[in-house]
């Protein structure tokens, strides 16, 4: 079995001018992932369940493991010296590491959701980490406009770790998607899913139907479309919703399907965050042959305006995403035949 470290070094040759910085940065993320995995796996025993008593910048109650994961990833990036700035879901302004001697010439910026879906921790449902890597814009100080608010298509790498029945790290550097499963017996991520591709079509739709009355009409119409009997398109489709973005999208990456978190009356701009949830997942899914839009606009083309901005997301099998886009257009152009 090829380990993550061996694979990263081997693929480094794909980047003729690479001097190993990105490889070391991915290694640092892999180390933090193993530390978080250890605590997630024993959360119930190590009194790491439950709330931390604080709320994060999103106004969400921080779970103890959220805070632990945030500390582990930031510390690993700080020690590694390849990252000059970390934008985390858990911090309003992010952490400028470029003042540290070890990171003063670091070339990369990391946007991260240290523990996504953390409200599921106490009920033992899969949670995940999502990360996105950019090059810093210039050699001067880190600025929001020049360095942080880059479009998703500027990412040099993106990935996620899913802490589930097994722990996997899935990432892309723009040359396809590869999945690594943690082998606890040797403490290494091993290549288990080379060159991952999402099926072009699927029968799974993933959306929180509890919000149905808050959805735009186009999404209400699409949900009804999924439920209508039609042998040719294998409908009714299967509804699967875990409530953990990493777990829902990982399942669809393997089985085929579409994940939708649209604009709603409660979240008029959508709930999920552009910089450290939607952009990295969009990069991965596009690299796996799928599609990721807001329902009309390609996510990787969006020009960010703020670090924690939220957007609607329709992501997964290309044909399923295109069908949702069709319902949005039809809502705008009712003359279109279904
Ligand atoms: P809802 C978890 O809190 C999260 O950020 C994503 O992981 C998940 O897809 C979504 O929110 C679930 O939101 O409103 O359906 O509970």
Image: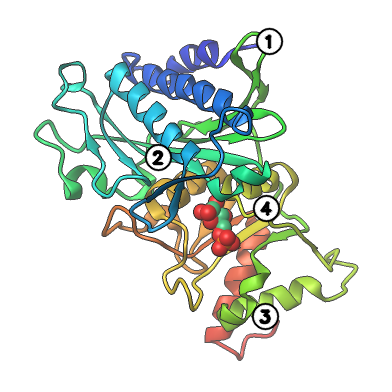
Quadrant of res 202: bottom right
What's the residue at 41%, 20% (across, down)? Answer: 28
Q: Does the closest atom of ligand 1 sit within 8 Å of the Cβ of label 4?
A: yes
Rendering coords of residue 147 (x, y %): 21, 42
N-terminal of the pair, mark 4 or mark 2, is 2
Q: CA distance from mark 3 to mark 2?
A: 34 Å
* CA gap, disc 4 and disc 3: 22 Å
Residue at x 62% of width, y 69% of height: 324
Determine the secondary structure under disc 2. strand
Q: Is residue 298 visible?
A: yes
Q: Secondary structure at mark 3?
A: helix
**Residue at the extreme left of the image, as rendered:** 140
Q: Residue at x 34, y 24 (%)?
A: 75
Q: Are the residues tagged 4 and 2 within 8 Å (C-beta)?
A: no
Between 278 and 127, the one lying in front of the other is 127
- Mark 3, mark 2: which one is toward the viewer? 2
**Total numbered badges shown on the rendered structure:** 4
Q: Nearer the viewer, residue 155 or 13?
A: 155
The quarter of the image holding the N terminus is top right
- Specify which label sits upstream in the sequence, 1 or 4: 1
Who's the residue at 46% across and 44% down the image? 280
Between label 1 and label 2, give the one nearer the viewer: 1
Are the residues at dot 1 and dot 3 in contact (C-beta closer than 8 Å)? no
287, 180: nearer the viewer: 180
In space, the residues marked 4 and 2 are separated at their CA atoms by 21 Å
Nearer to the camera, 285 or 79? 79
Classify mark 2: residues with Cα within 10 Å, few (<14), some (14-19) or many (20+).
many
* Mark 4, residue position: 242
Say the numbered circle drawn on residue 221.
3
- Mark toward the start of the polypeptide (3 vs 2): 2
């Amino acid at each position: 079995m090829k380990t993550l470290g061996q694979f990263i070094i081997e693929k480094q040759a794909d980047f003729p001018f690479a001097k190993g910085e990105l490889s070391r940065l991915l290694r640092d993320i892999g180390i933090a992932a193993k530390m978080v995995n250890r605590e997630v796996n024993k959360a119930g025993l190590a009194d790491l369940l439950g709330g931390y008593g604080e709320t994060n910048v999103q106004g969400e109650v921080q779970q103890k493991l959220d805070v632990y994961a945030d500390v582990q990833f930031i510390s690993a990036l700080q020690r590694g010296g390849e990252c000059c700035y970390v934008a985390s879901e858990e911090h309003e302004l992010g952490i400028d590491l470029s003042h540290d001697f070890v990171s003063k010439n670091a070339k990369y910026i990391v946007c991260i959701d240290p523990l996504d879906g953390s409200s599921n921790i106490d009920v033992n449902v899969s949670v995940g980490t999502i990360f996105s890597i950019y090059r810093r814009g210039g050699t001067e100080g880190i600025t929001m406009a020049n360095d942080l608010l880059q479009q998703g298509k500027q990412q040099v790498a993106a990935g996620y770790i899913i802490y589930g029945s097994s722990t996997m790290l899935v990432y892309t550097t723009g040359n396809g998607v590869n999945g690594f499963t943690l082998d606890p017996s040797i403490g290494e991520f091993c290549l288990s899913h080379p060159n991952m591709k999402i099926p072009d079509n699927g029968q799974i739709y993933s959306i929180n139907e509890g919000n149905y009355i808050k959805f735009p009409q186009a999404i209400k119409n699409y949900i009804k479309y999924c439920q209508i009997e039609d042998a040719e398109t294998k409908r009714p489709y299967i509804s699967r919703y875990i409530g953990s973005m990493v777990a829902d999208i990982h399942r669809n990456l393997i089985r085929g399907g579409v994940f939708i978190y649209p604009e709603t009356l409660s979240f008029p701009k959508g709930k999920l965050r552009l910089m450290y949830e939607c952009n990295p997942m969009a990069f991965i899914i596009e690299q796996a042959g799928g599609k990721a839009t807001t329902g009309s606009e390609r996510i990787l083309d969006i020009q960010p305006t703020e670090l924690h901005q939220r957007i609607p997301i329709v992501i997964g099998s290309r044909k399923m995403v295109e069908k949702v886009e069709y319902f949005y257009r039809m809502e705008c152009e009712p003359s279109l035949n279904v």
